[in-house]
Image (tube, rainbow, N blue to C red):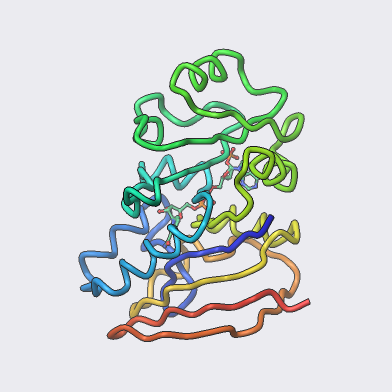
Amino acid sequence: MTLTISTSVSLNGMITPARGATGESVIPFLDVPPGVIEWKREARRRHGAVLVGTHTVLVDDPTLASHATPGHPAVRATLDAAGKIPRHARFFDGTARTLVGVTAETPREYLDFLAGRGVEAVVAGKAEIDLRRFLAGLAEKGISDVLAEGGGTLNRALLAAGLVDRLHLIVFPAVLDAGSVNLFEGGGDLARFRLEGVERVGDFLMVRYGRAI
Ligand SMILES: NC(=O)c1ccc[n+]([C@@H]2O[C@H](COP(=O)([O-])OP(=O)(O)OC[C@H]3O[C@@H](n4cnc5c(N)ncnc54)[C@H](OP(=O)(O)O)[C@@H]3O)[C@@H](O)[C@H]2O)c1
């Protein structure tokens, strides 16, 4: 299993303009060049699934399917032990293979709902989702390389668990409120990365790092 974090980040390391606001809301102010959007979609097509945190699904209501082409169908995953995601969320719209991390304590009613929508539940942990077990569960279902697109809490938890192999950032030309969501929320140990590549499109930088041992 390999895991790459891929997130768009401001010059000061923030991924949303405000707490509770979607990261997508800065897009109209940034004149994002088509080359940047295609870079992100191409990265998704190179991975077996796109993973996002529960709160990203709640705030953004994403489909995670904009990159899909006839040769590259979208596969999306999230975590939701308590069944918090609304039943009408676009995540459950049936347009793509969908997997949800759950636990042994996830309510039966939610598991039944997921099964009814054709969503694959991946049991990983008793009360809280064990990310290593979740990724192993995805691998058992044939998904061996995952692109994790945030948010900051999930990014931090993946890093703390030693599960991050690569870090791909789209650095966008803006400074955001430092009280919003950081690329890696909360505290943690120093983590060292190696620069593997950098591309520029207009005022945007696409930077690729690998985890240094
Ligand atoms: N700029 C970008 O590229 C970008 C990308 C993605 C998201 N975003 C933004 O980021 C924001 C959301 O980020 P966020 O940090 O608040 O939330 P998040 O990382 O999307 O979701 C974190 C939540 O996932 C749940 N979770 C379940 N098991 C977990 C585990 N083992 N480890 C970690 N989390 C687990 C927890 O929710 P419960 O405790 O409630 O179960 C946790 O609080 C949104 O505003 C979104 O727009 C920006």
- Return the x and y of residue 211 as percentages of the image width and height: 69, 74
Is 21 on the left-hand or right-hand side of 207?
Answer: left
Q: Quadrant of residue 40?
A: bottom left
Query: Which residue is at 53% across, 35% downward?
Result: 99
Quadrant location, the N terminus: bottom right
Left or right of 64? Residue 144 is right
Position of residue 185 measured from the top left corner of the image (x, y, whole percent): 59, 61
186 or 36, which is in the foreground? Answer: 36
Could you say where residue 108 lies in the image, as x and y percent from the top left?
61, 14
Q: Is residue 84 above or below residue 17?
A: above
Q: In the figure, residue 32 lies in which quadrant?
A: bottom left
Image position, residue 102 (x, y; %) = 63, 31
Q: Nearer the viewer, residue 61 or 199?
A: 199
Q: Is residue 136 above or below residue 152?
A: above
Residue 121 or residue 158, whichever sits in front: 121
Residue positioned 36% across, 53% down in the render: 21
Give the left or right position of residue 187, taking residue 171 as reference. right
In this view, 134 is above or below 119 = below
